[in-house]
Amino acid sequence: MKYKTLGKTGYNISCVMFGGVILMNESAEDAAEYVAYAIEKGVNYFDIAPSYGNAEERLGPVLPQYRKQIYLACKTTERSKEGSKKELLNSLKVLQTDHFDIYQMHSMSTQEDVDKAFSSDGVIETMLWAKREGLIREIGFTTHNEDIALQCIDLFDFATVLFPMNWAMGLNIGWGNRIADKIREKNMGMLAMKTLVERMWLDGDDRSRYPKSWCKPIFGDDKLAAAAIKYAFAKGASSIVPPGNFEHFEHLVKHIDAFAETPLTKEELDYLKAAASREDIKQNPIFRV
């Protein structure tokens, strides 16, 4: 397993992260098996959230035996001080841990999110309190909105950003270029999502194979998958979270060394550009901006 330094945190994290969505709606036995596999393969960054159905409940009983081996990131969609404090303390309890290595404002999407989160009664106050108390080590945020991401960075010295570094949107409209530059400038840690996906789901697509992915994953084209991952690393990502199914996670774990060791080639970039120019992808990005 290859590792990269996560910005100014100094954490040396696996280039593949374990996304908690993998555990959602799985049996306790399968959840334990998936976590054990990840640990065995050297994955040391786990990301989870209370908004991922029963994922916290599935990880909680398995986590204690591995806690000292991993960096654990969690999230809150609460924007108020009171609500986020309650959610943070509950996540700690359910996950049977005394701290989170990274705690994130989750899905910062609108101006209202920003105004509430950074108010005197906002979630930022919970995060500062929790850091003083030793309940969290670093503060981050997640977003699908580049303008909101840049605004958040101007308002607070975050340690990490979990952002959809998607090759198709990047090549078609320059999506992610501004945030990649800002993260590099601030020495923040970039965590990349929506990298192994092509476009939004369309009517007529068979979603049954990947019910936990809200956009269409790359499958059946290993060349495209490899180039997509290298694209995210080229933008500055330290770790990639695959779509929320074990099949994609396992594939990425098996091949990450090759993806992380060699830079994106001109041939691979040209292959990405050709794929991004397909009408189904060009007209149906993973979300509208």
Image: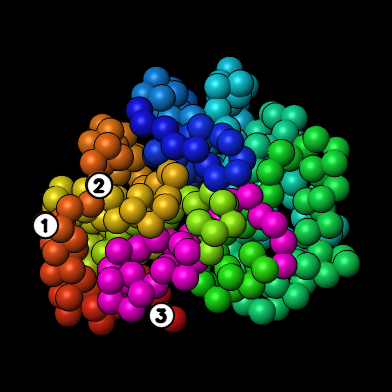
How many neighbours does mark 1 have within 10 angstroms: few (below 14), some (14-19), or many (20 or more)? few
- The stretch in magenta equals 155-181
For the C terminus, the quadrant is: bottom left
How many neighbours does mark 2 have within 10 angstroms: few (below 14), some (14-19), or many (20 or more)? some
Task: Work out how far the residue at label 1 is from the one at label 3, CA to CA, in angstroms.
Answer: 28 Å
Residue 265: where, in percent of width, then height?
17, 53
| 204 is higher (above) or lower (below) than 28 | below
The amino acid sitting under disc 2 is: Pro
Q: Looking at the image, which residue is at 68% across and 37% down?
A: 100
**Mark 1 / mark 3, whichever is N-terminal:** 1
Task: Identify the image quadrant of residue 67.
Answer: top right
Task: Work out how far the residue at label 2 is from the one at label 3, CA to CA, in angstroms.
Answer: 29 Å
**Mark 2 / mark 3, whichever is N-terminal:** 2
Quick one: SS at disc 1?
A: helix
The amino acid sitting under disc 1 is: Glu
Residue 218: where, in percent of width, then height?
23, 56
| 287 is higher (above) or lower (below) than 49 | below
Q: Residue furthest top?
A: 65
Residue 267: numbered disc: 1
